[in-house]
Each structure stands twice: as C-alpha cells, then as structure tokens.
Image (cartoon, helix red, strand yellow):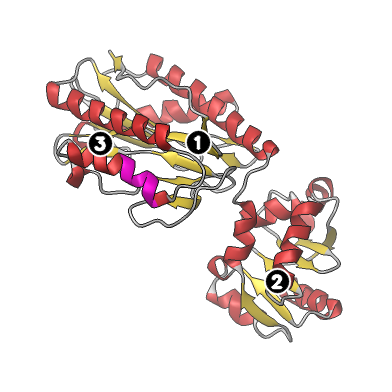
Amino acid sequence: MLNRVDRLRQAMEKAGLEAALVTSRENMRYLSGFTSADAVVVVTMRDCLLFTDFRYTIQAKEQSPDCTLVEITYANLKEKVRDALVQSGAKRCGFEQTHMNVADYEEYREMPVALVPFASEITSLRLIKTAEEIENLRTAQQMADKAYAALLERVHPGMTEREVVAELNYLCEKAGSEGPSFDPIVGSGPNGAMCHAVPGDRRLQKGDLVVVDFGCMYNGYHSDMTRTFGVEEADDISRRVYDIVLEAQLRTLDALKAGMTGGELDAVARDYIASQGYGDCFGHGLGHGFGLEIHEAPRAGKNSADVLLAGTTITVEPGIYIEGKCGVRIEDCCIVTEDGKINLVSSPKELQMIS
C-alpha cells in the first residue's frame, strides 16, 4: 500500500498541498486497505493516519498495518483530525469535495488549515489497474458468469421479475460474491425498454425478451455484465433487434484498443445501430470504467474525450429500446490493452431461450 500513498504524496506536492483528507470508502480502501466506511484517512508527507472507533480497531490493525491508527469517537473525530493536521504542520489540505456533505465541510473548514478541492486527483490514482486488481476483477466476473449460467437453468415462464432477481442474488452469493455490484436490473417484455428497469411483479411470458444486468464483487472489486434472453420464442422484430445489438457490440469490441477516446469507441456502435434504422433507440452512453466502484473513469459516450489507456477498464454495452415492445442490451466488461482488450466475460452471446 505504501506505493499508493507515495503516489498520492507526489500528486499532493504537485498541487502545493501538505496533506489530504480522504473520506470516500473506495479511496480509503485503495490507500489503506481498510474496508469499512466508518473511518477517515489523513495522508501527510510523513504519515498515513487511519481514524476509526472502537468497533473497528482490531479490523484496522489487521487490514492497515502501514497506517497509524487513531481511535476516535463520533463526537471527537473532527477534533482529532484537526490536531493531527496541526501537528503535521500542514497549511493546505486536499479533500474530496464530491464525498463530503455541507455539515461536515462547515466543521472541517474551521480548522486552521486551508481546504482545497482534490477529489479528482485522488480518484485518478485508481485509473490504471495493477495485475492484482485485474485478477480481482476477473474473479468477480467468473462468479457472475457462473451465476448467469445457473440462472438460465432455473428461470421459467410465469416467474415474476422479482423472483428472477431473488434467484440471481442467491446464485451470485453461492458463486462467492461479496454482494451485488448494484441492484440487479431485470426487465421483461415491454419493461425491457426501460434501460434501468426496476424488477416488479410482471411475469415472464412467451415471446418476451428479458434484459438482465448485474455484477458480482470480489475483494471490493466489481464486475458488470448484461445479457438478454428469450422466453420460448422470439418474433422477427425481436430477433432482428437482437442481431443488430450483437453485431454492434462485436464490431466495437473488435475496434477497442488503447489510444482511442471514449467518443471514438462509442461511435463504432452508435453509427452501426443508426445505419440499421434504430439510432433513436440507443439513448445512453456505450460504457464506463469499473473497479472499486461500479462506475469509474474512463467514460465512453458521444462526447467523451477520455483517452482509453492500457490498463484501464471499460464496459461495452450497446442497446436498443423500443417502447411498448422490448429492450436488448449486451454488455461485456474489458481491460484495455495496447493492441486490443481482455474480455473478462465468457457467457454466450447468441440469443438463448428458456422454457
């Protein structure tokens, strides 16, 4: 973990800061190894301090041996942080302005240390994934692939979307997931036209396409995949839409490599879908990075100037959504390489039918 803290110190020095106040769970974990959200991490030029209360001190000693542990109570946290910053001699302290509420900010700003917005610089440390991080992501996705294969053997016509989600959550946990990457999306028939459909009481019916978007977690790292399956049969329109989305995704995966911008990658899928007459039915961005958070940089969308560097992550998830009819989305999560990508998803992509 020390190399990560040292990289943060380099960013601090470049920004003219002597300290950084880290409050987001993901960045605290990245820097210290501590997995609870009930903490604060302060990095100075000489120390990395972890502030937490009695409930977590044993956990903190085990997970964060390179940090100086400061035991606090809810009432004296900000006082302890202030004392540590004053003792360090810091005059300017970076903080995560996107992960702090107004009430906390008003208290922290009373410290005799200037608070400087620094969230993007801290988060950017996580952009390029290490070999260890990639293995965590690979394991998380292997769990998701295993759960999805088992799900197709269990679902049947007449099940509600809620029941499908219940089965999926169980199968992910059984495969070893620490929990869902996010609330799973299951949209059947016309509900599939809602990109982020909330599973409800609609029952799977013959002729439906069913969109399933979910992920697993391993060591805090998230996977993300989407597949669309059919219920017993699919009509010509449904099959054509599915084939268009699949072709768009395959073309985009083939084009993916380091050096592209997110906008350039998005255009591969978007232009093909538009050429088939469904441009107005693909209304979201192509994809996003993933790691300790389910949505991270870089972004792949119409106007994204984010450069896809080797070692970054990106999802490729084109879709077509026809109101009142159906939705189709196919998503893989990938590691960008110099000459292409590593696709972490192994689940089949041909239109599968359940009965």
User: Which residue is label 3 attached to?
Assistant: 192
Looking at the image, is mark 3 or mark 1 nearer the viewer? 1
Q: Does residue 282 lie above or below 243 as drawn?
A: below
Which class describes the residues within 10 Å of circle 2: few (<14), some (14-19), or many (20+)?
few
The answer to which image quadrant residue 229 occupies is: top left
Relative to residue 44, is residue 269 drawn left or right?
left
Work out whether mark 3 precedes mark 1 in sequence or the reverse, and give the earlier one.
Answer: 3
Query: Which residues, given as a range, are shown in magenta?
Result: 263-268
Looking at the image, is mark 3 or mark 2 nearer the viewer? 2
Work out whether mark 3 precedes mark 2 in sequence or the reverse, and give the earlier one.
Answer: 2
Looking at the image, is mark 1 or mark 2 nearer the viewer? 2
* Residue 300: % across, % down: 41, 49
* Residue 228: % across, % down: 32, 27
User: Which residue is label 2 attached to?
Assistant: 14
Asked if disc 3 and disc 1 are in contact, CB closer than 8 Å, the reply is no
- Seen from the viewer's position, the closer of residues 266 and 183 is 266
The quadrant of the picture occupied by the C terminus is top left
Amino acid type, residue under disc 1 in the picture:
Cys
Work out whether mark 1 precedes mark 2 in sequence or the reverse, and give the earlier one.
Answer: 2
Relative to residue 235, is residue 267 drawn left or right?
right
Q: Which mark is residue 334?
A: 1
